[in-house]
Amino acid sequence: MSDLVFRSLPYTDPVVQRLLEEIYLDQTERYGGPDAAAVDPAEFAPPRGDFLTAWQYGEPVGCAGWRSDGENDAELKRMYTVPAVRGRGVAIALLAAVEDSARAAGRIRLILNTGPKQPEAIALYEKCGYDPIEPYGHYKDYAEAVFLGRVL
């Protein structure tokens, strides 16, 4: 996708906030409310994190960030693509960019959690080589939560 550009932006940037609002609306439709796991915007600041936005033809079409989880892991958070670009490879390219960023910061593994009402996300991660891992974090005691990871 030569027309796709990635930009690191602060989590508090207005473009990021607009994309996050779309994520929260989607989560509310699927689960009855947005993700309840605490997120501190500072966690996504380099070198212990990064927040990437995907742009196509000058418009933001997706986002994803990572934050440190221990010394070796990076946790993927807020992965999202706008509905208009889904199925066109944007999510795969965005995930690869996040992996590259985490790897460049010395992270060894990318981990994530998602839910059963996001089968397209689970399919994407499995297609990209993510396997089940031990539960962790805020949702570790939720029986339906899905935990995946991949060595970078």
Image (cartoon, rainbow, N blue to C red):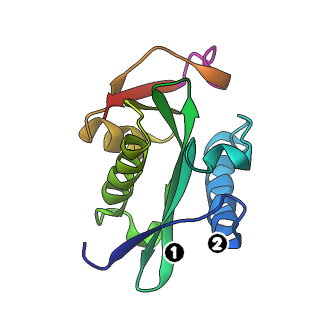
Which quadrant is home to the N terminus? bottom left
Q: Which residue is mark 1?
A: 60
Residue type highlighted by circle 2:
Val
Report crowding for label 1: few under 14, some 14 to 19, many 20 or more residues within 10 A (C-alpha): many
| Residue 128 highlighted magenta (yes or no) | no
Note whether 47 is above or below 122 in the view shown: below
Which residue extends farthest bottom?
A: 57
Which residue is painted at 67% across and 58% down in the image? Answer: 11
Residue 78 visible: no
Report crowding for label 2: few under 14, some 14 to 19, many 20 or more residues within 10 A (C-alpha): some
Which residue is painted at 71% across and 41% down in the image? Answer: 39
What residue span does the magenta drawing correspond to?
139-145
Which residue is painted at 52% across and 16% down in the image? Answer: 135
Q: Earlier in the sequence, mark 1 or mark 2?
A: 2
Q: Residue 33 at x, y = what percent?
A: 73, 43
Which quadrant is home to the C terminus? top left
- The label on residue 131 is none
Mark 1 to mark 2: distance in Å? 8 Å
Left or right of 146? Residue 128 is left
Q: Residue 148 at x, y = what percent?
A: 41, 27
Q: Quadrant of residue 72?
A: top left
Left or right of 68? Residue 88 is left
**Circle count:** 2
Q: Which residue is mark 2?
A: 15
Note whether 68 is above or below 43 in the view shown: above
Which residue is painted at 41% across and 36% down in the image? Answer: 106
Q: Does the CB distance between marks 1 and 2 fall below 8 Å?
A: yes
33 or 47, nearer to the observer: 47
SS majority, magenta: loop
Residue type highlighted by circle 1:
Pro
